[in-house]
Amino acid sequence: MIKVEHLVKEFGEVKAVDDISFEVAAGEIFAFLGPNGAGKTTSIKMLTTLLKPTGGTITIDGLDPVVKPLEVRQRFGIVFQDPSLDQELTAFENMELHGVLYHVPRKIRRERIEMLLKLFELWDRRDSFVREFSGGMKRRLEIARGLLHTPKILFLDEPTLGLDPQSRKQLWTHVKYLNETEGVTVFLTTHYMDEAERVANRVAVIDHGKIVALGSPDELKKQTNSESLEEAFLALTGSSIRDEKADSAAQMREIAKMWSRK
Ligand SMILES: Nc1ncnc2c1ncn2[C@@H]1O[C@H](COP(=O)(O)OP(=O)(O)OP(=O)(O)O)[C@@H](O)[C@H]1O
Ligand SMILES: [Mg+2]
């Protein structure tokens, strides 16, 4: 369903994605795991037509997103790392708007909105404004909306960020249910390794723009002699912090040192 070969994305000097290749089969749940700044969101943006690759090729359901962006967009749903709901519309209106934009015929649209809002336990709140929703409710609504046009692939960039353990668990139960009943392929990123271990069939670990490991959670644990995927992840990516603020603090210290030497 997804095929990526030698994909590269450069932002000036920064190589955000550095020659990655992988495939995701139809119906698979695939997790992209990596420290902050590893290149996960950049990869998703290229897969979903939002960014043009610097090099390499992408095929989504047999189509190249650079050549056929509109056709490719019909085939996936996406939930961004940053929320993208309209706060001034109700839950129902947000769904309806999306359905119209994706040309979902009225009857099917109404049925599917009801099915999805019920599944994600938002049907009773369908006429409430999104601005009155809690973080968890907004996340559920975004995922419901991403599934409205019955996409073949669902991209989820850190969908469970900031959710309590109950909501996280429930959200994955629903996603898994749709994966099983509708066969939707799921491409997700998360920093919660326990989730990836439970939900994903296969994971790719990405660090500094490169894939450093690829396989089932069990395979990665075996490879690294680890008890859990979290342990495997740390073994593969090391334990230093990838915080740009930390980097700039280090730079400031360097500059201060240079000045004091003068
Ligand atoms: N539009 C942009 N312009 C310049 N640099 C960018 C841009 N988008 C991303 N980058 C850089 O590319 C690198 C990868 O960023 P990306 O957002 O893909 O990381 P990520 O793996 O999604 O991290 P996180 O877990 O923090 O969300 C970072 O160094 C980031 O600063
Ligand atoms: Mg990201």
Image (cartoon, rainbow, N blue to C red):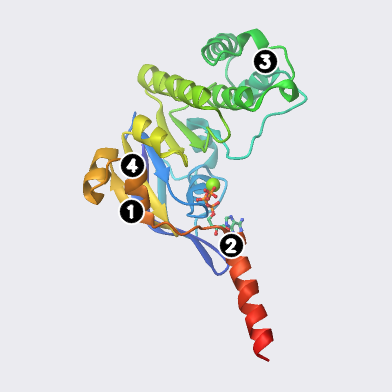
Cα distance, mark 4 to mark 3?
A: 38 Å
Label 3: which residue?
92
- Mark 2 and 4 residues: CB-CB less than 8 Å, in contact? no
Who comes first in sequence, dot 1 or dot 4? 4
Cα distance, mark 1 to mark 4?
A: 10 Å
Cα distance, mark 2 to mark 1?
A: 21 Å
Who comes first in sequence, dot 1 or dot 3? 3
Looking at the picture, does residue 170 appear above or below residue 58? above
The amino acid sitting under disc 1 is: Ala
Label 4: which residue?
229
Element under label 4? helix
Q: Nearer the viewer, mark 3 or mark 2?
A: 2
Q: Position of residue 124 (x, y in %)?
A: 64, 7
- Mark 3 and 2 residues: CB-CB less than 8 Å, in contact? no
The amino acid sitting under disc 4 is: Leu
The amino acid sitting under disc 2 is: Ala
Callout 4: 10 Å neighbours few (<14), some, many (20+)? many
